[in-house]
Image (spheres, rainbow, N blue to C red):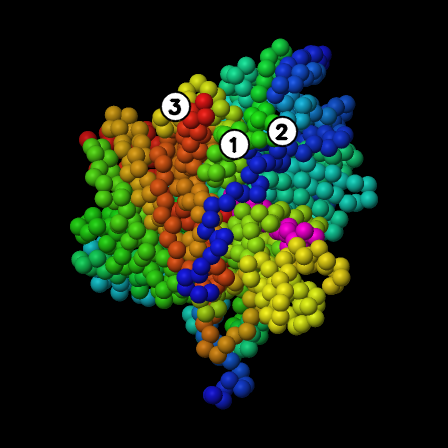
Amino acid sequence: MSEAQDFKYIGQRTIRPDGHDKVTGRANYAADLSLPGMIWGKILRSPHAHALINRIDTSKAEADPNVFAVMTHADIPNQTASGIRNILARDKVFYHGHAVAAVAAVSEAAAERALGLIEVDYSILKPVMNIDDATSNDSPILHDDLFTKGMPEEPKAPSNVASRNELSKGDIEAGFAEAEVVIEREFRTATVHQGYIEPHACTVRYDEDGHSMIWCSTQGHFAVRATTASMLNIEQTKLNVIASEIGGGFGGKLGVYLEPVALVLSKKSGRPVKMQMDRNEVFMASGPGSATRNWVKIGAKKDGTITAMEAKLCYEAGWAPGSSPLGPACMTVFTPYDVDNQYVEGYEVVVNKARCAAYRAPGAPQSEYACEMVINELADELGMDPIDLRLKNVAKEGTQTMYGPKLKAVGLVECLEAARDSAQYKTALKENQGRGVASGFWFNVGGESSVVINMNEDGTGTIVEGSPDIGGSRASMQMMAAEELQMPVEAFSAIIGDTQNLPYSNPTGGSRTTFATGMAVVEAAADVVSQLKERAAATWNITPEQVEWKDGKAFNTKGEGVLTAAEICGSAAKTGGHISGRGNISARGASPSFAVHLADIEVDPDTGKTTVVRYTAIQDAGKAIHPSYVEGQYQGGSAQGIGWALNEEYVYSSDGRLENPGFLDYRIPLASDLPMIETVIVEVPNSFHPFGVRGIGETGIIPPLAACGTAVSNAIGIRMSELPMSPPKILKAIQDAS
Amino acid sequence: MRLDHCYSMTAHVIFSSELQKFTGVREATVQAEDYRSLVIEITDRYEGLSAADIEDMSVAINGEIIVEPMLEKIDHGSEVHFLYRIEGG
Amino acid sequence: MQKTHVTATVNGDVKEFLCDPSDTLLQVLRDELGLTGTKEGCGSGDCGACSVLINDRLVCSCLVLGVEANGEAIETVEGIGEGDKLHVIQEKFLEHAALQCGICTPGLVVSTKALLEENPDPSEEEARYYLAGNLCRCTGYDKIIKAVMDAAKTMREKA
Ligand code: FES
Ligand code: FES
């Protein structure tokens, strides 16, 4: 792509194609589909955090006249499918809320009542609720077949440490030997939830002939198909998964919880089945993002040159080994810095909590929080401006990352400069206020995307894509097709295809949709253009090369003549039949997006209450296709990160029960908690994308943790090292200090 | 044109700490035309290193993270890194 | 369990339905009347996704029993628009990109209508506090508040 492209449609703020349905209530989400004869499924969940299941007696529930089907783990056909023990527990429950059995009954209330008829005999075990306990010598062991992976020597005994990771570059000891100032500190972050407002839900139907349909809210309906088909031993061609509108995901709707259960219940009962988690279940059994304990040590010369960076990261996986984002946590921790000597060691630990799920830039917020906090402390220690310190050591094109490759062109310098030049950075703070600045890095991914553009007889086009649209991406697809075809945005509609009518696509996640699916749209649109040219050429009896496509029309360069898309498509039957373009790609060249955030926070010294008085989010988008939705991602990521920093946490009782599985006590930011969130879109194009796009969805959740952490620390003059910084914790810190 | 181009391509492979347990070295020079032959070459060379160990990892070739590298051509002088898998949110 | 016969005006139409005494208004709207525009985010009055108006009073329909609707006028998101035209509030939500996933949008549109009926000229702070019962996890509220303020201004100019 050329450096500065002139765009006709890209960069405008169009009205999204699904907008009317969403403001009028017509849009159908997971819980909105009902079918004739439908019954309701519900899941029985463990009241204990850690227990052996001795016996499950479902006979009373089965005898209930309102009940159509009852199932346990044993009813899942493929007992070796991966993830099966989270769907329904086998011989052991590993967390409060672990699914144990399920029923389908005539109504939701009847299903709920029937759950009470199922008798489960448990032997209660001592739960293991945090990293410290899990790694202590006398800790109960969750899995007696779990031996730590990645140890220098093969471990002899099972352990709650699932794996060890290590990354390094340069010589860490030499780096610290060179340092004149060294700061080290340990940080803790709590278990958090993605907090999407729409609970998991699905409606399914298993037909006598073995075909089945799943309607559900998911970030990846092809992944739902794969998981469900494998657990139930169904051929994929017989299983159609329809992605409903999705009410938020943030990584938490990549996993599968209900669908295989609902389908077994449907098969057993011969009825369509609807299942919907209630809010408690969402908090108990889906989601959480890892709690962590992270130690970071950084050394620098007096002039601010950083000579060494070292980290030891511990991430909870929940009960299921391999569920934490430890790998990315280790890979991201120091990436904003071009420093020769870096070393990181990571541990994944299992505890009696729900299996961790991906949460926006999985792993990065916690590890980068620790790094950024130490960087800010280092700036204080050196008497340097924290942005200058970052600029002095900034990662840029050619920087060798600790995890391997060298960075291509990235926009961190531009983000830092924009932060330094921002209105907020120049504004003086008032009493009891503090300011924090922090950077963030996320890789972004590419992956498989498929798109078909069907050209209608009137010359308009329908874009069919396979990436569930969570944040307005259909608008971007329309705009990219419009740009490539040089036709107005309104000439296109965009829909999400089912697993049966569209080729495979990876889930919406990893900030890949506008990037990768966008590339597939461009490829499909280019395919349409070449077909339109061929058809025009056939009409004029010239070669396609003699046709020019411009302003949405074909021009005969060998004589007179112009044909519109409508004219070509309207007579497509005469020139070879229907015109449709195709883009099936495995997208390459996803490029990182860096961000810098500024937080100004006021702390009430009497109550510990925090108020975010001003906030600016700056991030490199490569190229913003639809600036409003890019800003929206920055703002939404900021708000989630602010919640993570200030208030959100899972609270457990001493026996491992989750005590706050609701929005009242798990407090996500309200409208009254936040200021306007100012945004700056930096655009350093990604040369691998035809329009320069980088993924932007995830990075925005990373910087708020340290920006807020530093702002609060500065406001009260005490270094806070634990999230969330809820009022009681701040108050205690103030009292302890005085 | 250098002669070795005609016969085989030489790639520079960097192993993660995880894989170094099997290889005992951080870096190696490997002759391979594509990713598939590179994997065969290193699993032959290092006892204990299996294709399954590598499957769990992501791969970057010349700085670009590639999700499904099997058919990827390896140009002479390429750098191949094995990384922890990245999952998005 | 004996069902109760209920008559209510819903979005201007007189509706009759049979209702289990324990059914919430939210369940009735969604499952009996097929008005699935009203969403369930929590079922406990904490998220506002189920916001509806009963005689112009803003309530969480998950906290109201279906039988309580008897004789009342209910307005849901489906009834906010004017014929084949969007309400100004809906237009402004679209213009300002005040939704991402959109699950909170029906509740916010209804709550905003209630706000602007009570207070046609709210300050940003007043709007934020009035809408504090409507959770949105996607947007950070910035664009929602901008849409609300713009809708208020447009409605004042039209009035
Ligand atoms: S569903 Fe009624 S307030 Fe959440
Ligand atoms: S737009 Fe998703 S919750 Fe508000």
Q: Secondary structure at mark 1?
A: helix
* Badge number at residue C121: 3
Q: CA distance from mark 3 to mark 2?
A: 31 Å
Ranked by sequence position, the earlier of labels 1 and 3 is 1
Total numbered labels placed on residues in the image: 3
* Badge number at residue C90: 1
Q: Where in the figure is residue A456, as x and y percent of width and height?
A: 68, 52
A489 relative position to A455: left or right: left
* Chain designation of label 2: C
Point out the stretch of residues depicted in magenta: A453-474
Q: Nearer the viewer, residue A332 or C30?
A: C30
Q: Where in the figure is residue A238, as x and y percent of width and height?
A: 75, 48
| Disc 1 with disc 3 on a shared chain | yes
Q: Secondary structure at mark 2?
A: loop
Mark 2 lies on residue: C36
Q: Secondary structure at mark 3?
A: loop
* Chain designation of label 1: C
Q: Amino acid at mark 1?
A: Gln
The crowding category of the residue bearing disc 2, from other C-alpha atoms within 10 Å (few below 14, some 14 to 19, many at least 20), is many
| Disc 2 with disc 1 on a shared chain | yes
The crowding category of the residue bearing disc 3, from other C-alpha atoms within 10 Å (few below 14, some 14 to 19, many at least 20), is some
For image coordinates 60% across by 65% down, the residue present is: A555
